[in-house]
Image (tube, helix red, strand yellow):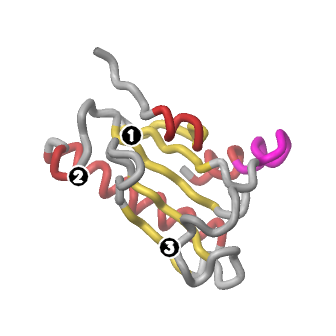
Amino acid sequence: MAFQLDPRLAADTVSVTQRGAIDIRMMRDARYHWLVLVPQIDNAVEWFDLPDVAARALFTTAQESAQRLQALTRADKMNIAAFGNMVAQLHVHVIARHKDDAAWPAPVWGVGDAVDFDAAGLKDRLIALRGIL
C-alpha cells in the first residue's frame, strides 16, 4: 500500500517540495512561516519508528530547513518539535518565531484562528520557500 498523508495534515498544509522521502509542507496560516516535515514512511508515529538512515535524514532536513527559514525570515527564535498529540502520523514542525508574532512568547497552537493565504500570498510564500529549500 502506498504512503497516505494523514487527512488533517493534508487539509492544513500545502506541499512545498520533496527531499528524498520527506515531504516538506507549509502550514496554511499566513501569520507564521511554518513548515511541517513528513517522512513518507508507513506507520511511523515516533521518530524512533524510522530506520536509522531515515531518522538521520529527517533530523538533517529539520536542521537545514530551520537554518534556511531563519535566514529568510530573520526570526528571533526557531521552534522545532514533533508532538503528534492531535495527528499521530510522524511529522516535525519548524516554525520561525518573532517577538511581535500573534502568539509570542507562547506556543502557536490555540492562539486565534489560522489566517489562510489568498492566491497571490500563497504563490509568493511558496516561491520564497522553494527558493531556500
Where residue 105 sits, quadrant-wise, is bottom right
At numbered mark 3, what does the secondary structure look like: helix, strand or loop? strand
Q: Nearer the viewer, residue 40 or 66?
A: 40
Of labels 3 and 1, earlier in sequence is 1
Of labels 1 and 2, earlier in sequence is 1
Does residue 101 appear to the left or right of 76 in the view shown? right
User: In the image, residue 121 lies at what x, y percent?
Assistant: 81, 48
Disc 3: which residue: 78
Q: Nearer the viewer, residue 62 or 49?
A: 49
User: Residue at (38%, 64%) from the top-left corner?
Assistant: 81
Disc 2: which residue: 47
Q: Which residues are magenta?
A: 117-125
Callout 2, which amino acid?
Trp
Q: Eyeballing the image, is 85 above or below 120?
A: below
Residue 122 in the magenta stretch? The answer is yes
Callout 1, which amino acid?
Ile
Disc 1: which residue: 22
Mark 3 is surrounded, within 10 Å at the Cα level, by few (under 14), some (14 to 19) or many (20 or more) other residues, namely some
Does residue 16 appear to the left or right of 62 in the view shown? right
Mark 1 is surrounded, within 10 Å at the Cα level, by few (under 14), some (14 to 19) or many (20 or more) other residues, namely some
User: Residue at (48%, 32%) from the top-left corner?
Assistant: 7
User: In the image, residue 103 lies at what x, y percent?
Assistant: 63, 76
User: Residue at (83%, 39%) from the top-left corner?
Assistant: 119
User: Residue at (30%, 57%) from the top-left corner?
Assistant: 59
Give the mark toward the camera: 3 or 2: 2
Q: Eyeballing the image, is 74 above or below 112?
A: below
Mark 2 is surrounded, within 10 Å at the Cα level, by few (under 14), some (14 to 19) or many (20 or more) other residues, namely some
Q: Nearer the viewer, residue 28 or 124?
A: 28
Callout 3, which amino acid?
Met
Q: Residues under labels 3 and 2: Cα distance?
A: 20 Å
